[in-house]
Amino acid sequence: MSNALAIAAVTAGLKDLIGNGLLGLDLSAIGSVSVSALPPDRITTGQTEPNQLNLFLYQVTPNSGWRNQELPARDGAGARMGTPPLALDLHYLLTAYGAQDLAAEALLGLGMQFLHETPTLSRAQLRIVLGPPAPPFGDFSALSLADQVEWIKITPKYLNTEDLTKLWTAMQARYRPSMAYQVSVVLIESDASARSALPVLKRGADDRGPKALAAGAPRLDEIRPAASELLPAARLGDVLRLRGERLATIGAQVMFEAARGGLQQALPASAGEDEHSLLVALPAAGAAGALADWSIGQYAVRVRGEASPGQPALLSNTVVLALAPLIEVAPLAAPTGDLTLTIRCRPRLLPTQHDGVRLVFGETQVRADSIDTPADPAEASVLEFTVPDVVAGNYPVRLRVDGLDSLPSIAGADGFEFDPQQTVVVT
């Protein structure tokens, strides 16, 4: 890897490449010619314009090939353990100046020919330019550029009239014949010290190393309410069916992790109808601790079990389960006009869920007038809603929490039908 002088070292290498090419030519008809690396606005133009080839670094961009090769490495405490190299592409403008007719054009052609015939800066050439007896940066060495893992490549870059106009306008210099080049890649390594991990002295208990198991980890494909796979979500008290592969493990547990609220639960699983399924029962809404241990929303579900006694536990992949609210509606019968409804919701609402609560009354959405979650964790959340100007009819009621609706239907003899306990009859 190179150090911070790599950009200047590349410029010095290009300047030397062009200068060496001019040394072997008879340019007496043009006069003396020099090679520089200056901003164009610092070069004299007009009557005293010199015969000169100038290299100007007008832009530096990240190299797309090396940009995502590595990421900064940090330990558990956040301390830096490694830093990826700074990978850069350098963009140069080769400009020709001439004291007489056709001199600038001739010099530009010569410069382009040299860069075309030598499309790379070789390691040997860089060592000559950057090393003794006269290193360009004095005591600060840039020789590491010659040893970087990737060679320095020179590629012509053809700019259109608009790009050239913008470039020369920004430089505030008189336009002269020019050619652009991209030079890549320069890899600059940080000089800052990084932490190095200590050697490992012991690999597990009794220094026996990791255990290798022939059995694969369980694989979960889906999780659905056992009552009907058509139900879009589960509720407290439901039995869930998990399907997948290699689920017949010892002491299988189903792990639930809420996406919101940080709640985690582990429930014992029982065998399903075949080796590809498991059953797990969610606690009933009235069970001790159920309202405090569970929340409405999305859960990441995994299976944990042992392939054989005494072996490390195996974890399956993750599938998503939606836990819908379980509600009680009062009153279920009311006269027309403005209607006040009381909804008891289980599990209890989290404080962060209050803003996302809506009552869907038939097809009308209503915001809550009040939300009360008692201090007693065994008590349900109580919500009050006012529905204006209700006309006669039957209205299924749904409670929507963060976009997840309660289930207003039940399984009947001929399929699903609206639950009478969640339907308000207005007369």
Image (tube, rainbow, N blue to C red):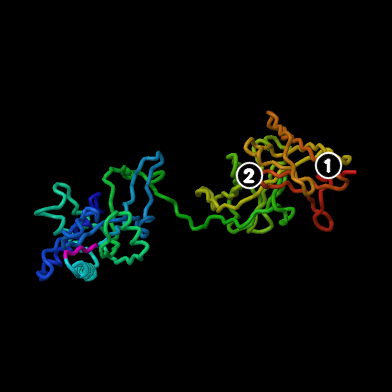
Which of the 4 image quarters holds residue 146? bottom left
* Residue 96 colored in magenta in the image: yes
Please state, as top left, top right, bottom left or bottom right, where the C terminus lies in the image. Answer: top right
Q: Where is residue 265 in the image (x, y as percent from the top left)?
A: 61, 42
Can residue 124 be seen from the camera position used here?
no
Say which amino acid is labelled 2.
Leu
Q: How crowded is mark 1: few (under 14 residues within 10 Å), some or many (20 or more)?
A: few
Q: Are marks 1 and 2 in contact (CB under 8 Å)?
A: no
Residue position for label 1:
389
Q: Nearer the viewer, residue 95 or 119?
A: 95
Give the farthest residue toward the right: 427
- Residue 228 position, x and y percent, is 74, 55
Q: Position of residue 158 (x, y in %)?
A: 33, 67
- Which region of the structure is painted magenta? 95-99
Residue identifier under label 2: 267
122 sits left or right of 234 in the view: left
Q: Which mark is residue 162?
A: none
Q: Residue at x 79, y 51 (%)?
A: 410
